Image (cartoon, rainbow, N blue to C red):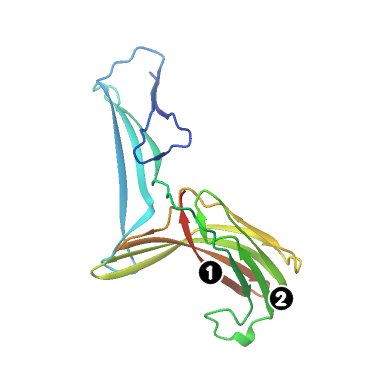
Amino acid sequence: MSVTLDIRLKRANKVYHEGESVAGVIVLVCKEALQHHGISLSMEGLVNLQLSSKSVGVFEAFYNSVKYTLRCDMKRSLLAKDLSRNCEFIIHCQPQKAKVVPTPVNFNITPDTLQNVRERGALPKFLIRGHLDATSCVISQPLTGEVVVENSDVPVKSIELQLVRVETCGCAEGYARDATEIQNIQIAEGDVCHGLPIPIYMVFPRLFTCPTLETTNFKVEFEVNIVIVLHDDHLITENFPLKLCRV
């Protein structure tokens, strides 16, 4: 006898805030009469702790390891298999009441502005400028701006946006810092026209970002890198710290 068990939440996006009720229905599909010993519903919040390979003895909790799950179990007789169904949902912290003040940033990238360069004289000549409309960003709105290649002795191969999540965890033994690339978007390919503004547009991924968090022993921060790859395999990177919030 074929039996299916399902959990259907009333909210299609499965996103809830503190204090809200998680509501929906349990759907049981069976063509014949069905005997069971009760249907139970449970809710679980799970945080996985991962031992850092960089700092032995320091534990780091990663944001994307936090899961909230609704579980439905139906007990059946000894001769029939119990049924179980899981449904994952998302909890957002309460929005901030304060207004977000845009903090636009203009940038100019030349060989002289680059850091961590051993042989600056071997770099090709280039001038890349642009701006980000804001570095204090609302998490539900895209990161925008533009980048312009004014001139370059070597043709451009690719221009990319790299979103990085930086987690810092501390205890009596010290602090551990872990940076993870969570999104990479190519905004230009090939040798782009010089002097032509290229739009920057990045939507923050819902499952891998959260409002910037800073506590005494734990921080979750975000950065965006503008990466220009030249045909001679030179890699030019400009880093911008971001502050994400929810309003």
Q: Position of residue 66 (x, y in %)?
A: 36, 49
Q: Residues within 10 Å of mark 2 (few under 14, many from 20)?
A: some
- The secondary element bearing badge 2 is classed as loop
- Quadrant of the frame with the N terminus: top left
Residue that sits furthest to the top in the current view: 33
Question: Would you identify the image quadrant in which residue 91 lies?
Answer: top left
Q: Residue at x 26, y 24 (%)?
A: 75
Q: Nearer the viewer, residue 98 or 116?
A: 98
Of the residues shown, which amino acid type is indicated by label 1? Asn
Residue 180 seen:
yes
Q: Position of residue 134 (x, y in %)?
A: 56, 60
Q: Position of residue 31 (x, y in %)?
A: 41, 14
Return the residue at label 2.
154
Q: Nearer the viewer, residue 117 or 104?
A: 104
Q: Position of residue 16 (x, y in %)?
A: 40, 39
- The secondary element bearing badge 1 is classed as strand
Question: Would you identify the image quadrant in which residue 26 lies?
Answer: top left
Of the residues shown, which amino acid type is indicated by label 2? Val
Q: Up-down: is 1 above or below 232?
A: above
52 relative position to 161: left or right: left
Q: Residue at x 64, y 64 (%)?
A: 159
Q: Residue at x 35, y 39 (%)?
A: 69
Return the residue at label 1.
239
- Closer to the chain start, of discs 1 and 2, is 2
Question: Would you identify the image quadrant in which residue 8 lies?
Answer: top left
Q: Up-down: is 107 above or below 91?
A: below
Q: Up-down: is 205 above or below 225?
A: above
